[in-house]
Image: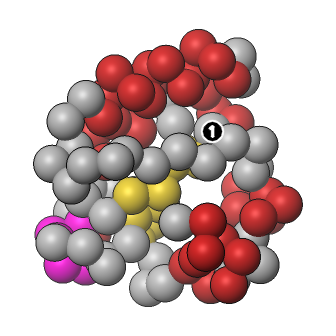
Amino acid sequence: LMHSLRHYELEGYFANVMALSNQHAAGKLAEARELQAMLGAESGRVLYIGDTTHDADIADELGWNCLLIPLGHQSREVLSGRGHTVIANLSEVGGHFRQRL
């Protein structure tokens, strides 16, 4: 994850970056809630980038801004049905981030 942020020159945009160490998304909502408490930031100031509808569910649950990216197990079509912006790749994050937050 950090390699990708460096590659797309996005490192300086985030106060905290978090990823799970397992591919099953076990505990993702609990981890997100812990992060929210740790940040102490207003929900509308948090940007959550994910690649599944489960990620969209978590962002919705916590009131976070959400970008979805179809680079995982779910297609653009599936992700588009969630009402969040779907980006093609991480190079699009910077422009969207500057516009929204």
Residue 11, image x and y in percent?
76, 64
Q: Is residue 4 above or below residue 68?
A: below
Q: Residue at x 34, y 21 (%)?
A: 30
Q: Nearer the viewer, residue 37 or 75?
A: 37
Left or right, 92 with reference to 59: right
How has the structure been colored for display?
Answer: secondary structure
Q: Amino acid at mark 1?
A: Val
Tell me which segment is drawn in magenta.
74-79
How many callouts does the rendering have?
1
The residue that disc 1 covers is 46
Q: Quadrant of residue 5?
A: bottom right
Query: How crowded is the residue under tag 1: few (<14 C-alpha within 10 Å), some, or many (20+)?
Result: many
Q: Residue at x 77, y 78 (%)?
A: 9
Query: What secondary structure do most residues of the magenta stretch adopt?
Result: helix
Residue 74, image x and y in percent?
16, 71
Q: Quadrant of residue 94?
A: bottom right
Q: Is residue 38 above or below residue 82?
A: above
Using the rendered image of the protein, determine whether residue 14 is visible from the camera's viewpoint: yes
Q: Is residue 58 magenta?
A: no
Residue 72, image x and y in percent?
25, 73
Secondary structure at badge 1 equals loop
Q: Residue at x 59, y 14 (%)?
A: 37
Q: Residue at x 31, y 79 (%)?
A: 71
Q: Nearer the viewer, residue 89 or 4?
A: 4
Q: Is residue 57 above or below residue 82?
A: above
Residue 23, image x and y in percent?
21, 55
